[in-house]
Image (spheres, rainbow, N blue to C red):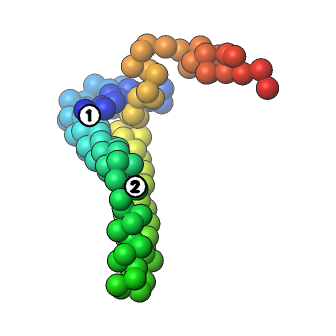
Amino acid sequence: MSNTRDWTWLDSATEEQTENPENEAEIKELVSQWNNLHNEEEQRYFAKDDRDDDYEDYLATMEEDQPGFIAEQKAKENVRIELYEKQMSTIENMLAERGARMCRPYEHFNEEEKYMEYMETKGDYD
């Protein structure tokens, strides 16, 4: 199941940005790319979560056969995560340059930010 987010104009967006069809088309493409990256990362996380028990045994076996295997796998994962974060950040910066941003998850429910903050803390009596 894919989870997609939409986009919205920044308060600082100019009329030139909001009225330009080419700008809006570019925004939609950037949002599509953002959603694709986000969904791939989410699916990777779910798959990793599903295989964690067997994967730990696999890593231990591979480390016995090839010393340094675990360090190599961790290095690959660290680089992959850093690239993912930079790609997402680049897309978000490009959206901002065009006067747009990704919607926050609760904005899809047409909720006000202050109300959502209240609902998130309601019941927190600490």
How many circles with numbers are drawn on the protein? 2
Element under disc 2: helix
* Residue at the disc numbered 2: 52
The answer to whether 48 is drawn above or below residue 62 in the figure is: above
Instruction: From the top left corner, tell me how far across and down residue 97 is, in percent.
Output: 39, 43
* Residue at the disc numbered 1: 2
Residue 115, visible in the rendered structure: yes
Element under disc 1: loop
Q: Earlier in the sequence, mark 1 or mark 2?
A: 1
The answer to whether 115 is drawn above or below residue 50 in the figure is: above
Residue 72, visible in the rendered structure: no
Residue 38 tag number? none
Q: Residues within 10 Å of mark 1 (few under 14, many from 20)?
A: few
* In the displayed structure image, the side of residue 37 where residue 12 appears, left or right: right
What is the three-letter code of the residue carrying label 1?
Ser
Name the residue: 35% across, 68% down: 58
Quadrant position of residue 59 = bottom left
Q: How crowded is mark 2: few (under 14 residues within 10 Å), some or many (20 or more)?
A: few
Instruction: From the top left corner, tell me how far across and down residue 55 is, in percent.
Output: 36, 62
What is the three-letter code of the residue carrying label 2?
Asp
From the viewer's side, name the closer residue of 57 and 113: 57
Q: In which quarter of the image is the C terminus?
A: top right
Distance from disc 1 to disc 2, alpha carbons, whole Å, reads: 22 Å
Q: Quadrant of the N terminus?
A: top left
Name the residue: 35% across, 48% down: 50
* In the displayed structure image, the side of residue 36 where residue 125 appears, left or right: right
Name the residue: 41% across, 86% down: 67
